[in-house]
């Protein structure tokens, strides 16, 4: 977590955990996902005569999203590792070829090698791959927390409904 309360520049309170786009901090999902929810709600009521809450819909979507995000995260991790290896190999090969058998001190060789790695990293996709990796890591880590929060909200709502029904039935018995 950095000083801005974000993790790698991504504030989970301002990121829709379903699609990864920006959202208002007070909202559960972004406006795009809310539009999808509205369509799903209308369809559910029209077809199944069942109303679904935004919390129920978001929970279902989040649960469905976990395996997809895990797969994307693993791919991003593999891509990043492959790129690191490629940069390391290219840097070493390039520096040794440039020296053409001439010797330099270990310290100089290490510094030259490090600078070459940084150049290859920046010239290649290093920052982009690392950013995607961190972004997916954040979403993968936070999605289970969102699911837990949503399950608690649904349980609390169910408990309130149950208590309300009990009170209503006691009133009708009088």
Image (spheres, rainbow, N blue to C red):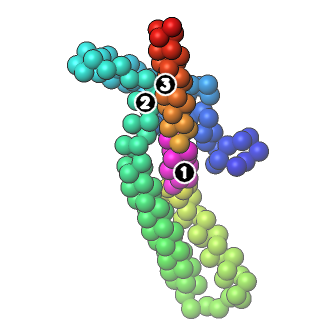
Q: Residues within 10 Å of mark 2 (few under 14, many from 20)?
A: some
Distance of label 1 from label 2 (alpha carbons): 21 Å
Residue 27 seen in render: yes
Helix, strand or loop at label 2? It is: helix
- Disc 3: which residue: 162
The residue sitting at 50% across, 20% down in the picture is 166
Is 116 rendered above or below residue 9? below
Residue for point 54% across, 65% down: 120
Dot 3 or dot 1: first in sequence order is 1
- Camera-side mark, 1 or 2: 2
In the rendered image, residue 64 lying in the magenta stretch gets the answer: no
Q: Quick one: SS at disc 1?
A: helix
Q: Which mark is residue 141?
A: 1
Magenta-drawn stretch, dominant element (helix, strand or loop): helix
Residue drawn 70% across the image and 49% down it: 1
Q: CA distance from mark 3 to mark 2?
A: 17 Å
Could you tell which of marks 3 and 2 lies nearer the N-terminus? 2
Q: Which mark is residue 56?
A: 2
Residue most extreme to the front: 174
Of marks 1 and 2, which one's residue comes earlier in the chain?
A: 2
Q: Measure the C-alpha gap from mark 3 to mark 1.
A: 33 Å
Q: Is residue 53 above or below residue 82?
A: above
């Amino acid at each position: 977590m950095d000083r801005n309360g974000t993790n790698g520049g991504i504030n989970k309170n301002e990121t829709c955990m379903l699609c990864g786009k920006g959202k208002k901090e007070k909202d559960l999902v972004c406006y795009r996902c809310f539009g999808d929810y509205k369509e799903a709600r209308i369809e559910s009521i029209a077809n199944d005569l069942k109303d679904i809450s935004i919390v129920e819909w978001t929970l279902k979507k989040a649960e469905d999203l976990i395996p997809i995000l895990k797969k994307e995260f693993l791919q991003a991790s593999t891509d990043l590792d492959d790129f690191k290896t490629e940069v390391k190999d290219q840097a070493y090969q390039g520096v040794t070829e440039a020296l053409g058998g001439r010797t330099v001190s270990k310290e100089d060789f290490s510094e030259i090698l490090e600078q070459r790695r940084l150049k290859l990293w920046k010239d290649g996709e290093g920052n982009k791959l690392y950013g995607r990796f961190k972004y997916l890591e954040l979403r993968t880590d936070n999605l289970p927390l969102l699911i837990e929060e949503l399950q608690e909200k649904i349980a609390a709502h169910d408990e309130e409904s149950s208590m309300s029904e009990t009170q209503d039935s006691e009133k009708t018995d009088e």
